Image (spheres, rainbow, N blue to C red):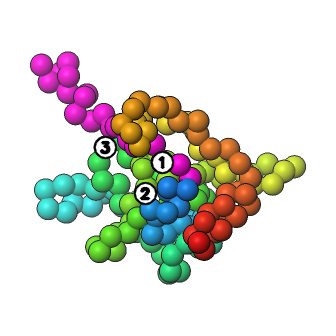
């Protein structure tokens, strides 16, 4: 029975978060470079933690590094050396988590002939709107400077 339905245990249902909601709910928003990632055992659970080196703070108190924890299978996958924008929530433990799993991770694409773009592919996991109805994600594709303006102006309100 587990072999047939076991995969359901690891499926995630997420609430779709608008950019404004992610900005409001995040304690920190940074453009950062991913450092080393490693597995860490805490109690009976194993987590993946990654070190981020902030390049630019858009929201929150600046500090030299951030530890991000992936809480469960299916969470965001980070590659060492990758530069991204992270929407983070940091609780009392001081360990940050990415908002809305991959919703809070925005890649940066640079083409020689154009300005840097903030890009996130559409999420294929099950998403619900704020009323609990199934919905779809369109991803994100906008100039990085425009994303920064939107986040910084909303954070200042």
In depth, the one of 87 and 52 nearer the eye is 87
Determine contact: label 1, label 2, CB under 8 Å. no
Which quadrant of the view contains residue 155? bottom right
Residue 81 falls within the magenta-colored stretch: no
Report the disc number at residue 73.
Answer: 3
**Residue located at (58% from left, 59% from top):** 85
Earlier-in-chain disc, 1 versus 3: 1
Instruction: Decide if residue 130 is on the left or right side of residue 20.
Output: left
**Residue located at (41% from left, 30% from top):** 134
Can residue 2 be seen here? The reply is yes
Instruction: Decide if residue 32 is on the left or right side of residue 144.
Output: left
Report the disc number at residue 17.
Answer: 1
Q: Which segment is the magenta one?
A: 1-19
Residue 58 x, y percent position in the rendering: 60, 70
Can residue 35 be seen here? The reply is no
Q: Quadrant of the C terminus?
A: bottom right
Residue 3 falls within the magenta-colored stretch: yes
CA gap between label 3 and label 2 equals 14 Å
Element type at mark 2: strand
Residue linked to disc 2: 98
In depth, the one of 103 and 51 nearer the eye is 103
CA gap between label 1 and label 2 equals 12 Å
Q: Nearer the viewer, mark 3 or mark 2?
A: 2
Question: How many numbered marks does the figure carry?
Answer: 3
């Amino acid at each position: 029975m587990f072999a047939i339905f076991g995969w359901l245990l690891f499926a995630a249902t997420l609430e779709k978060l608008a950019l404004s909601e992610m900005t409001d709910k995040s304690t920190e928003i940074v453009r950062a470079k991913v450092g080393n990632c490693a597995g860490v055992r805490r109690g009976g659970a194993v987590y993946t933690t990654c070190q981020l080196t902030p390049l630019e703070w858009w929201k929150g108190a600046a500090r030299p590094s951030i530890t991000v924890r992936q809480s469960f299978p299916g969470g965001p996958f980070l590659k060492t050396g990758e530069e991204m924008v992270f929407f983070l929530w940091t609780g009392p433990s001081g360990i940050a988590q990415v908002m809305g799993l991959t919703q809070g991770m925005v890649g940066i694409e640079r083409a020689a002939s154009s300005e840097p773009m903030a890009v996130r592919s559409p999420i294929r996991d099950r998403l619900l709107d704020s009323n609990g109805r199934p919905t779809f994600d369109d991803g994100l594709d906008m100039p990085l400077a425009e994303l920064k303006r939107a986040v910084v102006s909303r954070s200042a309100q």
